[in-house]
Amino acid sequence: MVSSHKTLFVYYKVPSDQRGQFKAWALSELAQRSQAHPGLQSQLLQRPEISPEGFETWMEIYEHPMEGVNEALEQSLRQSFARSQLPFKRMVEVFIPLL
């Protein structure tokens, strides 16, 4: 049986020398999305290392503990990502619990 309890993982690379500028932006975006969708939980993570090219990899995680990320919520989040005008390529991955 496959679970439909989805979690979205969104990652992108940020120039290390622009970290402060984009951290404030990313935290604001996460807060706005959580406020727009009651029960949505979000988190901002980064890999501990910086690439040789000077980039940090950041990860946004979106989950709804009770309902999972349903189709309507996923579509709304994807539209929000597109409107955010992040100057870096954003990759969105969907995962479900392994049962």
Image (spheres, rainbow, N blue to C red):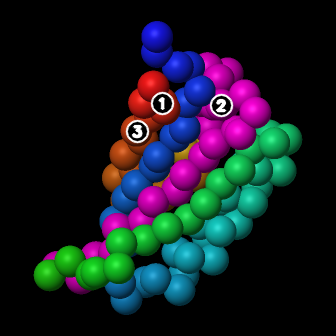
- Which sits earlier in the primary sequence, circle 3 or circle 2? 2
Q: How busy is the neighbourhood of tag 1: few (under 14 within 10 Å), some, or many (20 plus)?
A: some
Tag nearer the camera, 1 or 3? 1
Residue 75 can be seen in this image: no
User: What span is in magenta?
Assistant: 53-79
Q: Could you say whether the residue bearing mark 2 is in a helix, strand or loop? A: loop
Type of residue at label 1? Ile
Residue in the picture at 42% in, 41% down: 92
**Which numbered marker is on residue 96?**
1
Determine which residue is flagged by label 2: 68
- The residue lying toward the viewer, choosing from 72 and 95, is 95
Q: How busy is the neighbourhood of tag 2: few (under 14 within 10 Å), some, or many (20 plus)?
A: many
User: Residue 72's quadrant in the figure?
Assistant: top right
Label 3, label 2: how far apart the Cα atoms are:
14 Å
Is 71 inside the magenta-drawn segment?
yes
Q: Are marks 2 and 1 in contact (CB under 8 Å)?
A: yes
Q: Position of residue 16 (x, y in %)?
A: 35, 84
Residue in the picture at 63% in, 42% down: 63
Determine which residue is flagged by label 3: 93
**Which numbered marker is on residue 73?**
none
Q: The C terminus lies in which quarter of the figure? A: top left
Type of residue at label 3? Glu
User: Residue 26's quadrant in the figure?
Assistant: bottom right
Left or right, 83 with reference to 31: left
Q: Is residue 34 above or below residue 29?
A: above
Is 63 inside the magenta-drawn segment?
yes
